[in-house]
Structure formats: structure tokens, C-alpha cells
Amino acid sequence: MAILIDQNLSATPNPGAFGQTITFRQALHSDQAAGEIVSIRYRLSRGHNVWFERSGGDPSKEIRFNHVQIAATSTPLEHSFLIVQGPGVGPMDNVEVDCVINTAAPGDDPVSNFTLLGIASTP
């Protein structure tokens, strides 16, 4: 069983700015006729001052979406969240946003995708 990338991860707007909502888009499909359920995890490096803000207002270097259905045909995905300034090294011109996709099947290797997000000084 495998998840395949049809469209690489992208960010809009890019560059973004602190206090701005960024939308991450990608398209995936499953090699299984019935599709698959996956978890999707967006991550930022721990060392810099760029953080995601969770829906409850807490800053985090990682946001996870569980139980995402990926069909056997190309499945567009869109996740939006705020980027905020937090502790760490900065200012940064850009940061790498990693996206790791895991299936529920034991032994399946995770699929990784990433994009660079430019960080503007003002929105």
C-alpha cells in the first residue's frame, strides 16, 4: 500500500508574515482501489522563531490531521493555519515546512513532502 504525490506541497501567500493565515496545498492518491486513511503532520524546525498557531491559540512546531481519506484518484488537500513569532533564532528569510504522511498499514514507509515559506517583515 502506498500514498503517491500528485502535486507537491505549496504555500499561499508566499511569502507570508507573522499573524497571517497560510494555506498549504498538495494532491495525493492511494495505490489502493478503496483508498486509504492517513495522518498528515506539518512540522517546522525547532531552532527558529517561526511557529504555527493551533486552533486553541497555542503555538506549536507541529500540527497533525488524523483520519484523512485519500482516494485512488488525485485527492486535493488544503490546510490553513496561522504563523506566529515565538522563541528561537530570527529573523528568518524563509523556513522549510515539512509534511509527513503516514498510513495506518503496518510496515508502510511515511511519505514526505516539503515547501519553503518566505517570511516577510510585515503582512
Image: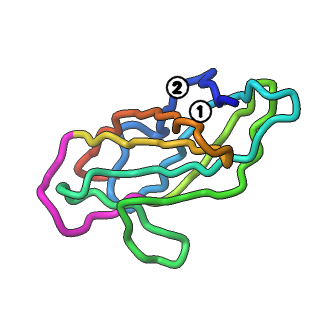
Q: In this picture, is 66 found above or below 79? A: below
Real-space Cα separation, disc 2 to disc 1, in angstroms: 5 Å
Disc 2 target residue: 8
| Residue 75 included in the magenta stretch of the image | no
**Percent from the top left, x then y, of residue 84?**
34, 63
Which labelled disc corresponds to residue 26?
1
Left or right of residue 40: residue 95: left
Q: At 53% from the left edge and 36% from the top edge, which residue is drawn?
A: 109
Amino acid carrying mark 1 in the image: Gln
Say which amino acid is labelled 2. Answer: Asn
Q: Which residues are magenta?
A: 83-93
**Quick one: label 2 or label 1, which is nearer the N terminus?**
2
> Main structural element of the magenta stretch: helix, strand or loop?
loop
- State the SS at label 2: strand
Q: Is the Cβ of the residue at disc 2 closer than 8 Å to that at disc 1?
A: yes
Rendered residue at 74%/32% (across/down): 75
